[in-house]
Image: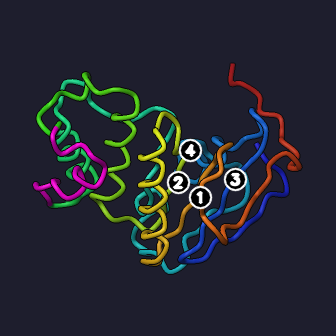
Amino acid sequence: MFSGLGFAVASGEALIVTGRNGAGKSSLLRMIIGFVQIAHGRIELEDGDPELTVAEQAHYLGHQDALKPSLSVSENLRFWAGFLDADRTDFRPELDAVGLNELADLPAAYLSAGQRRRLSIARLLAVKRPLWLLDEPTSTLDASAQERLVGFMHTHLKEGGIILAATHATLGLSGAKELRLDNIQPVAVEAAP
């Protein structure tokens, strides 16, 4: 999808990926997480766990909130913790941090779009991973929730984490690097017959 694209992001740094609609911001994040196979080049997480892939050391927050509607708010976090190999059962601190503690027993199907997004953000907090890949992370969030997200991102960076965020919005991460995809040449991809 890209030709001549290269960047490095160190521990404690954020890279904001910007560009017009269709420039490849989401595709870039999907390549890093492994949803889209790259034809050439490499993706590395230096100083990461050599036994794990980049995807196994990353959180991906995409356009769609990966929630099971029939599970409650807390059951969704329990599911993700189990799926991500975290041995935890109490998620009250994370639910409180995103303002969903009072809804812990409510099925996710009844959550508003903003509440679903906040539950997805709680997953970032519940299971520690060094790399956060955030695709339009402030989408559907009100101003208060956006401020909380910025606080979570600052904490993640202070703890040595890395953030790659594809966005049209200003995230309020001072000192973040920026990668504009408007100037990158896309490579044509042919559909398989």
Precedes in sequence: disc 2 or disc 1: 2
Disc 4 to disc 3: CB gap under 8 Å:
no
Residue 91 covered by magenta stretch: yes
Q: Is residue 97 above or below residue 61?
A: below
Disc 4 to disc 1: CB gap under 8 Å:
no
The magenta region covers 88-102
Decide: few, some or many residues near mark 4? Use Cα within 10 Å; few <14, some 14-19, many ≥20. Answer: many
Between residue 139 and residue 51, name the one nearer to us.
139
Indicate the amino acid at tag 2: Leu
SS for callout 4:
strand
Q: Is residue 116 left or right of 27 when viewed as pictured?
A: left
Q: Is residue 119 left or right of 169 when viewed as pictured?
A: left
Between residue 56 and residue 12, name the one nearer to us.
12
Indicate the amino acid at tag 4: Asp
Quarter of the image with the C terminus in it: top right
Q: Is residue 12 above or below residue 180?
A: below
Identify residue for label 4.
Answer: 135
Identify residue for label 2.
Answer: 133
SS for callout 3:
strand
Q: CA distance from mark 4 to mark 3?
A: 9 Å
The residue under the point 69% across, 53% down is 17
SS for callout 1:
strand
Q: Position of residue 45 (x, y in %)?
A: 54, 71
Q: Position of residue 136 (x, y in %)?
A: 57, 42
Q: Position of residue 71 (x, y in %)?
A: 17, 30
Decide: few, some or many residues near mark 2? Use Cα within 10 Å; few <14, some 14-19, many ≥20. Answer: many
Identify residue for label 1.
Answer: 164
Q: CA distance from mark 4 to mark 1?
A: 8 Å
Disc 1 to disc 3: CB gap under 8 Å:
yes
Label placed on residue 17: 3
